[in-house]
Amino acid sequence: MKEFYKKVIEANEDRIPLAMATINQDKDSVFYKGHIDGYGLSEQYATVSQMMHLTAGYYCEQNKFYKNKQVLETIKGYIQFYFNTVRPDGSGDCLISDFFTPSSFDCINVVRAYRIMIKNAKTEEEKDVTLQVYRVLDTMGNGFISSGHRTPNHRWMIAAAASMVFNVTKREELKKLALKYLDEGIDIDEYGEFTERSPGMYNEVNDRALFIIAKELDLPYLYNHLQANMDLLFKYIEPDGTIFTQNSARKDKGESDPSMGFYPTRYFAIYLLGAYILKEEKYAAFAHQVMEQTIRYNRAVPDVLWLYMLEEKLQTFEPKIGKLQSNYEMYNPISSIYRKIHDDFSVSIIGNNANFLFVQKGDLKVYVRLCASFFMLAQFKPEKITKNGNVISMEFSAEDRYWKPFDKKPPTSVWKEMDHSLRKTCNVQRLKFLVDVTIVNTTVNIDIKVKGTDRVPFKAEFVVTSGSIIEGEHFTVKGNASQDIIPHQGYVTVKYKKDTMKIGPAFKKHMYTTNMRGSVPKSSKGYTIYFTEFTEIDKQISIICE
């Protein structure tokens, strides 16, 4: 993959001027010489992590910033900023949320910078900067020992950083800390899914950490866990190259914008290492695909020059490129997810989510929601999904009731102080959704039954890619973002670029849609098509992709 090396150098060259131009110049501020981010903040992570990129560029002979004096001065400023802001116990601050936190994410990047310096520093000034970076790492090590973690992935980042600093400083307590976290066992299930289920963001964090720990502490058994998750990512890639993230337990889920796209660019280094260290042709194929698509579609090339500087053989590395599986089916009942991919057609069904069904054909996407105005409780979120043959079944139930007056006068008239469990109840009402999805070729058939209380307003909503053309028998409209329509009958045709979907047959009994109590807000990014009815319901809807 030496063809990408020049692009990586160019990405680094693009970063360096921006890094040097965004430095806090307020000499009276504790944040003096820190990197200023988009929020106007100077954080330790964003600042000292830049050191890795600047160091790689400074020592890369093919880089136009090779041995650039201003680059070295900027690195010195980062070190000054670090010692201005480090807490007495060696911890630091993530100003957007976490304080007195161990500097694990940033430490990993600083170790990379240090190792590049150790290999290449020649002048007394360069050697002095290297020594100062050693002091930074030793101080960060104190923070790992004094502090702790807040999320599952933080454990592995602390263990990874501690193991790296151990190999730099030889402080045994750091190795013991890393091994103590490993004693908890890796939180990955039989399908390769981590606890946080975050393919767009934190799975990569975990994979990166396991790679580091396995190498730093010579624990090859960790590669089994790592590869299980790396293989799982293949099952989350959509036809347009994005990662399906709607089953995530972290912020990459994009609850407010289910159509948001996460590209796997950040995984390039992981899969390149998978090809290089683990000798896996499929990882080479994925790394090649990620970078090739990144370049082709003019996305930001990952600045991983540090990797090529640490593993110099990668500069001329040409692995055998394997073949990736393009058509597959996946069902994971533990994570409540089913996915089926065939060429440019994909279907995803997930449990415990208002956006429970996603269908994609090429660049055209639709996601489906169901809701009834039942005591503000009946936004359909399937409690679990089960697969029986070619049928994916889901259920959801809601129940509510009314209270009678107390039989005995309560001891207080303050509502919140009353013991409402002593009240008798009446008019108990229940509503139950039974939804089956069957996939036949590129058609998704949805069978919807809603039983229980009658006369409850119900809506099915289909959020499609904005910019589509929406057509019915008697109308044609532009599918502008945040707008909607309630067709009365027949099939609704949605066209976007070269792809077409037909959704229907439609039904309309009321117009209680966007502000239905208990439902999630209408999409501001997509165009929404509503079908409406009253319970009880027995409806069949098809999404036909062409």
Image: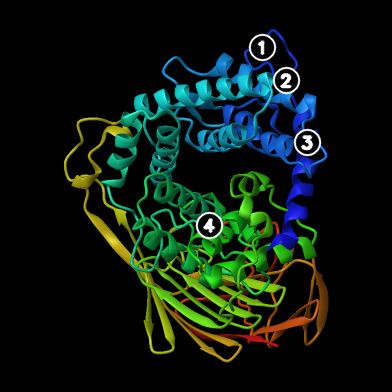
Q: Pinpoint residue 138: horizontal percent, then vertical percent.
A: 45, 24
In the rendered image, which residue does mark 2 sit on? 24
| Left or right of residue 57, residue 188 in this image | left
**Residue 517: mark in rendering:** 4
Q: In the rendered view of the protein, which quadrant contains the N terminus?
A: bottom right
**Distance in Å between CA atoms under marks 4 and 3:** 61 Å
**Distance in Å between CA atoms under marks 1 and 4:** 49 Å
Q: In the rendered view of the protein, which quadrant contains the C terminus?
A: bottom right
Q: In the rendered structure, which disc, 4 or 2, sits on the residue that comes first in sequence? A: 2
**Residue 29: mark in rendering:** 1
Q: Residues within 10 Å of mark 4 (few under 14, many from 20)?
A: some
- Name the residue furthest front: 122
What amino acid is labelled 3 in the image? Tyr
Which one is in front in this view, the residue at disc 4 or the one at disc 2? 2
Q: Pinpoint residue 35: horizontal percent, then vertical percent.
A: 69, 27
Residue plotted at (61% across, 88% down): 442
Residue 386 in the image: above or below residue 410: below
